[in-house]
Amino acid sequence: MESQFGKNIRRIRIAKGLTLKQLAEKLGVSFQSVEKWEKGITMPTGKRLLLLAEVLEVTQNQLYETEKSEELDTVVISKVEYDRFQQALTRENELLRELAELRKEKIKDLEAEKIKGGSPAKNPTSVPN
């Protein structure tokens, strides 16, 4: 018999991209324990319940809500979207740093060529005077 509590755990876990095993590892329990919670066979208690809410980044009350809560969905979706946004920003910053390094190298190469007395590569579309 699946409980709303179990449905909420499963929904949040999946929205956060966690497998049963990953969530279980974060909680220090077996994946079978988490599976039993999601199926409504057993329930976490005490410290395990507190840790579950903390790991899933929701309140204990949100885990027990009996109706599908738009607020809970918003919290979960917002966290997932925020994480994806942060990952994209991090990657963008890495790419910008790489581009800046490439530009510096290109400038050094051009300056070295000028010092050697050469000239930068000519533009094939330029017309001689």
Image: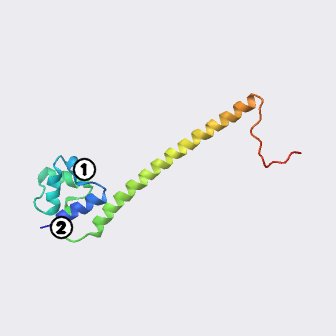
Q: Nearer the viewer, residue 23 or 50?
A: 23
Q: Is residue 52 left or right of residue 79?
A: left
Q: Quadrant of the N terminus?
A: bottom left
Residue behind mark 1: 22
Q: Amino acid at mark 2?
A: Gln
* Coloring scheme used: rainbow
- The circle drawn on residue 4 is 2
Q: Picture quarter containing residue 9?
A: bottom left
Q: Position of residue 102 (x, y in %)?
A: 59, 40
Placement of 71 over or under 18, stated as above or below: below
CB-based contact (under 8 Å), mark 1 and mark 2: no
Question: How would you rate the neighbour count of disc 2 (Cα within 10 Å): few for under 14, some for 14-19, many for 20 or more?
Answer: some
- At horizontal 28% and vertical 54% (from top left) the residue drawn is 18
Work out which residue is located at the far top of the displayed protein and give it: 116
Q: Nearer the viewer, mark 1 or mark 2?
A: 1
Q: Amino acid at mark 1?
A: Gln
- Rendered location of residue 126, percent (x, y): 81, 48
Report the residue that reaches farthest toward the right: 129
**Residue that appears at 24% across and 70% down:** 68
Can residue 62 be seen by looking at this rendering? no
* Depth check, front residue: 3 or 20: 20
Please indicate whether residue 125 sits to the left or right of residue 27 in the image. right
Kindly identify the residue that appears in the image at 17 percent across and 55 percent down.
34
Query: Would you place residue 68 above or below residue 9 in this image?
Result: below
**Disc 2, SS:** helix
